[in-house]
Amino acid sequence: MQIKQYVAKDIQEALRKVKEEMGSEAIILSTKKIRNALRGPGLYSPPMVEVVAAVDRPSKSSSGFSGWDPLAWPVGMEKVRGPKESEEELFLRKIHSAGLFPEFVQGLAEEIRAFRKEPSAKNLTEAYRGLLSWRLMECVEVTEPSFKGPRIWSFIGPTGIGKTTTLVKLAAHFRLKVTDRITLITIDTYRIGAVEQLKQYAQILRLPLEAAFHPEELRQIIERNRHQDLLLIDTAGRSPHLTKPIEELRDFLTVHPKIENHLLLSATTKDSDLEWIVERFRLLPISSYIFTKIDETTQYVPLFNQLVRFKRPLSYLSKGQSVPEDIELATKPRVANMVLSAITWN
Ligand SMILES: Nc1nc2c(ncn2[C@@H]2O[C@H](COP(=O)(O)OP(=O)(O)O)[C@@H](O)[C@H]2O)c(=O)[nH]1
Ligand SMILES: [Mg+2]
């Protein structure tokens, strides 16, 4: 087994180095934040990330999804096999029962089968978990917000998913930490009280709020606010069962090419409904997902499956009702850990 340490400015860069040098078979043994020792005292020294990775065989394919041999994973593996069940079978049965996207599990099954043949592999279950964690991180793309040029973010999704709350959390966060050149915009003008709800937050945050009743009005508002750093657009919840409201939303959100649509998905929605929601909202260009209500359940597998099904970067995780603190930037290890914690290991 070859073990190597990598130091990089962030986890993405470290994982990229690992993959380049050790191949996609490498497993992550540990990750931690460290100080940048190259900087002298007194100088600002951003934290670095140290990743220790191991590989047990020469790197071969880079994708976990290709060339899966269906015979490698007998049908009915989800049934308890009795005392003779191997570590490999037990592990695969557990992740299969967790409901992970079949294509993902199939790719992993193939890799684990190859891994087992290595006589040097000792603690197999740990190694399998490391491999799973690595593959989960590989499947997830995350975003890094930057404010080079104005950003225009809209928040879309079904009713009650947390669009307004998320927008306010982010407005408050950026207002306090980054810039006060933020304008709140709402196109949620159908419901009585919707504009009022946002107006109160806008007053507390001392940020301007504008309401657009027609797409052309939204275009004018964006044009007027083009010197701001961030424009945040709240939308009305649209039923994914009706095409027309989503088309109306599209009329609004295509008035400017820089609008980035964030599709919100709740952790409390079941897998088949998530798929349906995404299918409908794909009528619009989706820049990123935001997962909401992750505090209300520990069943994160459906959300992860969605990342595999329709690949889009994940930007934020919303984890409660409190403004502004209950939100965090999504990271690959965080998402991998969420999925690992949702699997019943014992
Ligand atoms: N537990 C929990 N509740 C949330 C979260 N985000 C929003 N909510 C609550 O969900 C409800 C609907 O939120 P709202 O932002 O009005 O949804 P919208 O209709 O999509 O704009 C409110 O009671 C929020 O406080 C979250 O991450 N966790
Ligand atoms: Mg709302």
Image (cartoon, grey):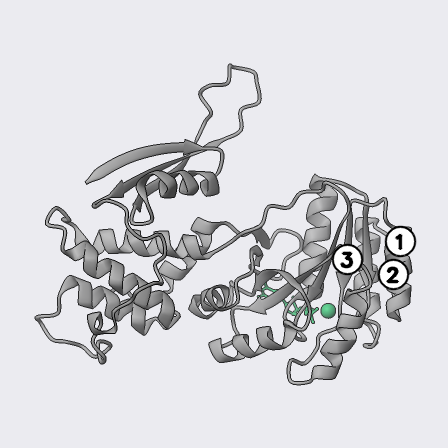
Viewed as shown, does residue 122 lie left or right of 214? Answer: left
The residue indicated by pointer 1 is: 223
The local crowd at label 1, few if under 14, some if 14 to 19, many if 20 or more residues have their Cα within 10 Å, is few
Q: Nearer the viewer, residue 190 or 116?
A: 116
Evaluate whether residue 298 shows in this view: no
The residue indicated by pointer 2 is: 219
Residue sitting at 76 percent across and 72 percent down?
249
Evaluate whether residue 335 shows in this view: yes
Quarter location, residue 115 = bottom left
Residue sitting at 68 percent across and 47 percent down?
173
Q: Nearer the viewer, residue 252 or 271?
A: 252
Ligand 2 has an atom within 8 Å of the beta carbon of the residue at disc 1: no
The local crowd at label 2, few if under 14, some if 14 to 19, many if 20 or more residues have their Cα within 10 Å, is some
Residue sitting at 20 percent across and 67 percent down?
90
Between the C-alphas of marks 3 and 2, the distance is: 10 Å
Q: Which mark is residue 239?
A: none
Name the element at disc 3: loop
Q: Quadrant of the C terminus?
A: bottom left
Residue type highlighted by circle 3: Pro
**Location of ligand 2 given as a quarter of the image:** bottom right
Q: Quadrant of the N terminus?
A: top left
Residue type highlighted by circle 2: Arg
The residue indicated by pointer 3 is: 257
Residue 303: where, in percent of width, then height?
Answer: 49, 67
Viewed as shown, does residue 91 lie left or right of 179? Answer: left
Residue type highlighted by circle 1: Glu
Q: Mark 1 vs mark 3: give the one in front.
A: 3
- The reply to whether dot 1 and dot 2 touch (C-beta < 8 Å) is yes
